[in-house]
Image: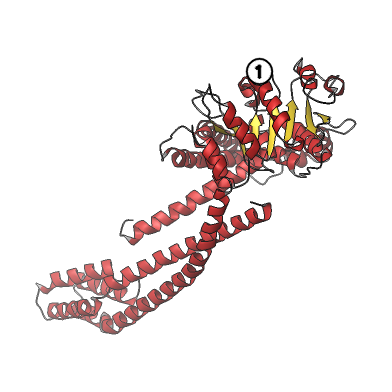
Amino acid sequence: MTSRLRAFARLVTVAAVATAYVALHLAITAGMDLRARERFRDAPARAAAFTAALGRYADGEVAARDEVGQGAAWFADHAPPGESRAAVSAATADVQKGRASLARERVAGLPAQVEREQARLGRDLNSSATAAACWAVPAAALLVPALWLRRRRRSGVAEIVEVVGQFAPRQPWWRRPVFLTASGVGYGLFTAGSLAVSMAQRQGFEMQLAMQVLLLPCGLAALGAGILILRHTRPRSARGAAQALLADGRRPVLYLRSFADDDTAARVDDQAPVNIHSREEQLAGALGVFGPVIAVGRPGEPLPRLGAARFYLPHDDWQPAVLRLMELSQLIVLRLGLSEGLWWEVEQARATQPARKLVLLALDGLSGVARRLDELLPAPTRLDEVTAGGPSPSAVITFDPEWTPHVHPVGPVPGAETSRGMLARRAARTKEAARSVFITYTPTHHVARAMKGGLASVGVRKRTMAWRAHLATQTSLWKGFQLVTAMGLLGWLVFRVLRLFGFG
């Protein structure tokens, strides 16, 4: 599925969901109007009975007082807010005070009031039903292309889904919705806590000192609770590889690495003031410009790592599936390591795949990587020369069609001012600006920037790649905002349905 078609499919789906949601709300409104009209259908007879009982009571029939009370209770339960309910309530109050003649005067126009209110209820029902129908038509019209585009999107990755889904562990159907809901709560606390702490720390903000003193600990508590909830729920609500492929529709990026590197990739850098995203999550965010990122999960792990969507292969027969996924993926990103299985993957990618499809990550300055890699390539990488001098020399390697390596070192641009230095210099102009600095470059941003340059050198250009890694936190918070909003809209819809059926 091309990028334009994918964007169009998302637009159609969003429009279909939005119009269907509005149509459903209007249908519920029409149902409530119908329920109100039906409940008030017997109002003329009830009004006549109430007026007659009131007359008998005024004529001295004491037993008619109970009938007056019953009529008043019916109008209180069944009449819409308006003239008839108010007139009956006032007349009943007069009866309780012994002013029967005044009560009769109050309900003299009750039949006309009931007739007007029944006509108004009918008009409300017609209006809400017409509005629901007007929205239901475009919702149904948009639903057809949305479902067709969804089916087409899924058909494009059907073979890949079949490969990665063969050994997917079964999960209860309720697991992801429950933990997504809990994640929404965590994102809400995280965002509220961040805003509260930011407001409490700002100088010149018009707020009483006592409020600031109260806001800071409350904000820190909400922030900490949100982080704890998200750390527990996000791995349990993460999509598997098959789900990620079906949701996206593009051919994936296959991320290969040694399982021994998972702990390093799961590290959360503390450059940003508040960061909950691991290095692998940021890398997956950068590579998401191509498509969903999938990776083989470690056998036996209790929970999937966050970042690339996991799938699981048998320990003794994983090579055929990896070879097939290499063919079906649009990009192969391979983090070099020391395991023999990883070097088998390098050899197979070199032998079977187009050169521009392979990206090698030589991170953390592993010794012996350059020598072994040079044995597989037609030209030396000179990796040790390019990355010399750094505390942890790292590089990204891409290849042109003749398999000539292009090595791009990972790290700040030589001679360029770091983001922290630039922001500190700008923020020094005012104290207020110093309080609002939240932009820092993480190590994964430098890896993504090196990948961007390496791919550009072989003709593959993705301008937003580095910034997608840098904005992983903001992107996730936006998804969290969407999740919280969806929960709120769904809750409001459930509340109205309960009201329709008489609950609440």
Residue 80 visible (yes or no):
no
Residue 371 visible (yes or no):
yes
Q: Residue 492, percent across and down?
A: 44, 55
Q: Which residue is mark 1?
A: 340
Q: Nearer the viewer, residue 235 or 316?
A: 316
124 to 314, vertically: above or below = below
What is the quadrant of the C terminus in the image? bottom left
Q: Measuring 80% from the left and 32% from the top, which residue is drawn there?
A: 403
26 to 362, vertically: above or below = below
Q: Residues within 10 Å of mark 1 (few under 14, many from 20)?
A: few
Q: How many marks?
A: 1
**Residue lying furthest right in this view?**
415
Q: Nearer the viewer, residue 54 or 340?
A: 340
Question: For this view, does 85 lie left or right of residue 54?
Answer: right
Colouring: secondary structure
**Residue lying furthest front in this view?**
351
Q: Residue 345, percent across and down?
A: 66, 26
Question: For this view, does 49 lie left or right of residue 491?
Answer: left
- The image quadrant that residue 336 belongs to is top right
Mark 1 element type:
helix
- The image quadrant that residue 47 belongs to is bottom left
Q: Measuring 46% from the left and 39% from the top, which residue is drawn there?
A: 176
**Residue lying furthest top in this view?**
367
Q: Residue 272, percent across and down?
A: 70, 33
Question: For this view, does 128 lie left or right of residue 41?
Answer: right
Q: Amino acid under label 1? A: Glu
Q: Residue 386, percent across and down?
A: 86, 24
130 to 246, vertically: above or below = below
Q: Nearer the viewer, residue 307 or 156?
A: 156
